[in-house]
Amino acid sequence: MYSEQVLDHFQHPRNTGEVSSPDAEVQLENPACGDVLKLTLKIAGGVISEIRFLAKGCVPAIACASALTELVKGKPVAAARSLRQQELLDALGGVPPASTHAADLALDALNSLLSRLPHPPRLGETG
């Protein structure tokens, strides 16, 4: 039913927990199924230096959160913003069609998290 990659991320999730003194954090819940995902991160030089998650939900929800953190850690924020559902699903070897909501939750949380980052002033702007 689940791919080897999904089961591996579920049984051995990567980057669990919370980042200490994060630059941004977010918690989202999927009201349809009750899955909850919290993401916290640190940015250094425009790059995601650390990202962690806490999740309560189904096997694909935990696997998607784990895979998401691996895909964006060490990447520039702009690259993380461009992550698409298919890339996340491909990293997991796919999920059953009824479970794509887990990828949506992970990506919605990531986009919300990145939107909470403080924006540096643009050239010519003051504080």
Image (spheres, rainbow, N blue to C red):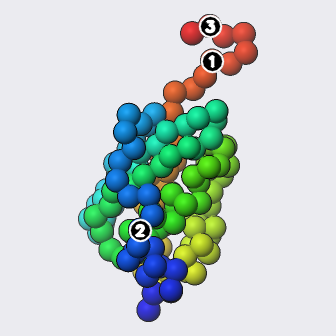
* Residue 123: x %, y % from top left: 73, 15
Residue behind mark 2: 13
Q: Amino acid at mark 2?
A: Pro
* Residue 77: x %, y % from top left: 62, 42
What's the mark number on residue 121? 1
Check the image and report above or below for 53 versus 88. above
Label 1 vs 3, first from the N-terminus = 1
Residue behind mark 3: 126
Q: Residue furthest right?
A: 123
- Residue 101 shows up from this direction: no
* Residue 100: x %, y % from top left: 47, 73
Q: Quadrant of residue 120?
A: top right
* Residue 84: x %, y % from top left: 62, 61
User: Which class describes the residues within 10 Å of circle 3: few (<14), some (14-19), or many (20+)?
Assistant: few
Check the image and report above or below for 8 versus 49. below
Seen at 39% across and 44% down, the residue is 19
Seen at 62% across and 70% down, the residue is 86
Residues at discs 3 and 2 in contact (Cβ within 8 Å): no
Q: For numbered disc 3, what is the local secondary structure? A: loop
Label 3 vs 2, first from the N-terminus = 2
* Quarter that holds the C terminus: top right
Give the tally of numbered discs.
3
